[in-house]
Amino acid sequence: MSTVNSIEVENLRRVFTRRTPRKLPWQRNRQVNGNELCVTGSDKSGNQPKTTVAVDGISFEIQSGEIFGLLGPNGAGKTTTIKMLCTLLEPTSGTARVGGYDIVREPAKVRGSMGTVFSGERSLYWKLTGRENLEYFAALYDVEPSTTASKIDSLLSKMDLESKSNEPVERYSTGMRQRLAVARALLADPPVVLLDEPTAGLDPQSARNLRDTVRSLRDEGHTILLTTHYMAEADELCNRIAIIDHGRIIALDTPAALKAGLQEMHSLEVEVDRAPDGVLDELRSLPLVRGVESHASNNGLETWTIRVLTEDSRQTLDALLDLLRASGDRVLNMKANEPTLEDVFIALTGKSLRD
Amino acid sequence: MNNVRAFWATAKRELLIRCRYPDWFVAMLLWPILMPTFTVFATQALAGPDNSGGEVFAELAGTSDYIGFVFIGIVMWSWLNTVLWQVGATLRTEQRRGTLESNWVTPASRLAIMFGSGLTNMISSLITVAVSLIFCKLMWHIDLTFSPLLGLVFLLSTAAIYGLGLIFASLVLLVRELNSAVNFVRGMFMVFCGITYPISVMPHWMQTVAKGLPLTYSIRLIREIGLAGAGYRDVSDAFWILFAFAVSLLAGGYMLFILMDRIAARKGILGQY
Ligand SMILES: Nc1ncnc2c1ncn2[C@@H]1O[C@H](COP(=O)(O)OP(=O)(O)OP(=O)(O)O)[C@@H](O)[C@H]1O
Ligand SMILES: [Mg+2]
């Protein structure tokens, strides 16, 4: 593979305008009254358009033969980016090229040079069998008719679906549907494959298998863009990762380089006996602390874990414990970790990917 | 050719899905028999035991075969109904299934996909019409003469209605709600197009409205050609009006579809239910 770019994204931006859902007359009245109470003097129409900036001027390049990950929390703009690249959604501004074709000016050529796997399992015909689904889409992708049958057979066996190929998709498990969707994306042997949250909803074993499949696709020469909100997945799978939050790319590098940037940092994990909402802001304002987040410990006991990213744990630790005790939290456990991609995210945004 | 292939593949897909909902098949055969029958009895009652009402009717309608007259009106109207519903709902159905986007990201022509699933709808509604006609011949002994001209009129009507369906399908992409629009149009057609009565019995302004609706001409032509045995020369005016409707509705539907598809991509509503 040469080092040509398969995907080039330049300052891509997408704004959604939408009206707030219509209200019944008496509901609208109530809202107007509320506004008057606020005395802010804002206008009274309860139905003005709202704008959401889903993708806010992102740029990146994906080289041929690489697995590129878009990592970000819910609502970060991952799906919106994918939809613009696969020509379902027009960008508000900016440009992108897939396989050298402009997504706005040459949409048909873009569609011909990529396969897309959407998140969720509704993208297939549930009343058709797996094979019928593939036959149908092979016609739409205009796969050479004489080789269609053998192509479908080989994809079914590659995705481990042969035994179920003649059963309707409604009888498939989530993992099988996801594999069928991947098979469909590969029908035309496209140079570029887009995968939107390919492992969402899969059990750990199926997710692992799917990651193996993605790797084998890369080894066969496909260029892959995938989105995920699992850091471990991005870390394990991707050659390069763009971390995206609120529609902006806040970091872009190899997983190793992203973590190396935090080499001098320490990640402290403190387990406490109750939800520590009150002290988090105080913790954030401690000197040298770069990010704080907390989540339920997930250990069956009703405890919470606070994660603190600091430039020097020796200097932070004492103040941290003081603060916690002062607020009445009981410290149950504590450890220091190597920084992970999650910490990268915390360091960059001050919050967790889970939020 | 890619477009032809996509067209047939979509038609086959839709046929397969239909065959897996067998209740649809029963409805397809039962409805066309039940639907016209109840009006036929009503008409018979109005004609009176000595058929004196029938004579008046013959004068107004230009045919004494009032059962045939009513039957053709109703069959054509319910046919229009199904086509409007089904073609109009094509994109909506795909949106609901969640498969619209997977179709739209393929390089296949979107119009070929539209027409492909339309074909299956067309065939199923044609079967309905055929069942009605056979039933009507056997049960009510209606003397319908089939001719190439009749076939041509039917084809033109199909094109006109299909164009209308395309317009609906495109609008649905934007407003995501079909019911009220289809109900409005079929209500218009039911009242104005002279389904069970000659349009000459309506007030003048209603007749003017009727002249603006393609179904008026379809029904009139089929009655005149099929029942009264008229030839091309007798009906050429109505024939060309129907032709013009067919061409402009198809062209309008086509352009609207392209436009709405573009707007939908711009607004980002393709994937929404
Ligand atoms: N069609 C739409 N109309 C209006 N707003 C939208 C639309 N699609 C997405 N958004 C908004 O754009 C933002 C980004 O959404 P997007 O689906 O791209 O996020 P995501 O990163 O894929 O999140 P998730 O992990 O939940 O899938 C969200 O705030 C969302 O509400
Ligand atoms: Mg998403």
Image (cartoon, rainbow, N blue to C red):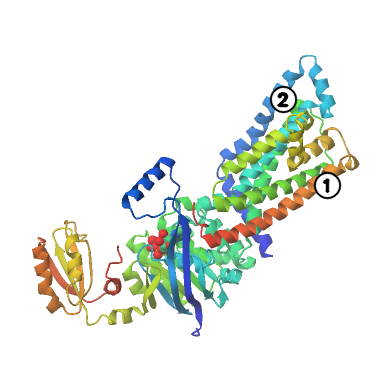
Q: Is B63 above or below relative to A253?
A: above
Q: Are marks 2 and 1 on the same chain?
A: yes
Q: Secondary structure at mark 1?
A: helix
Q: Residue at x 85, y 43 (%)?
A: B237
Q: Is residue B145 visible?
A: no
Q: Say what amino acid the circle numbered 2 marks.
A: Val
Circle 1 residues within 10 Å: few <14, some 14–19, many ≥20 = some
Q: Is A173 above or below relative to A186?
A: above
Q: Secondary structure at mark 2?
A: helix
Checking the image for residue B40, the label placed there is 2
Quarter of the figure with residue A334: bottom left
Q: Is residue A201 visible?
A: yes
Q: Position of residue B61 (x, y in %)?
A: 82, 29
| In this rendering, the label closer to the viewer, 2 or 1 | 1
Q: Say what amino acid the circle numbered 1 marks.
A: Trp
Q: Gap in Å between the C-alphas at discs 2 and 1?
A: 31 Å
Outermost residue, top side: B49
Q: Position of residue A203 (x, y in %)?
A: 34, 60
* Residue that carries the numbered disc 1 in the rendered image: B240
Outermost residue, bottom side: A2
Q: Position of residue B149 (x, y in %)?
A: 84, 43
Q: For this rendering, which residue is in front, A63 or A30? A: A30
Q: Residue at x 74, y 52 (%)?
A: B248
* Quarter of the figure that contains the N terminus of chain B: bottom right
Assess mark 2: CB under 8 A from ligand 1? no
What chain does mark 2 sit on?
B
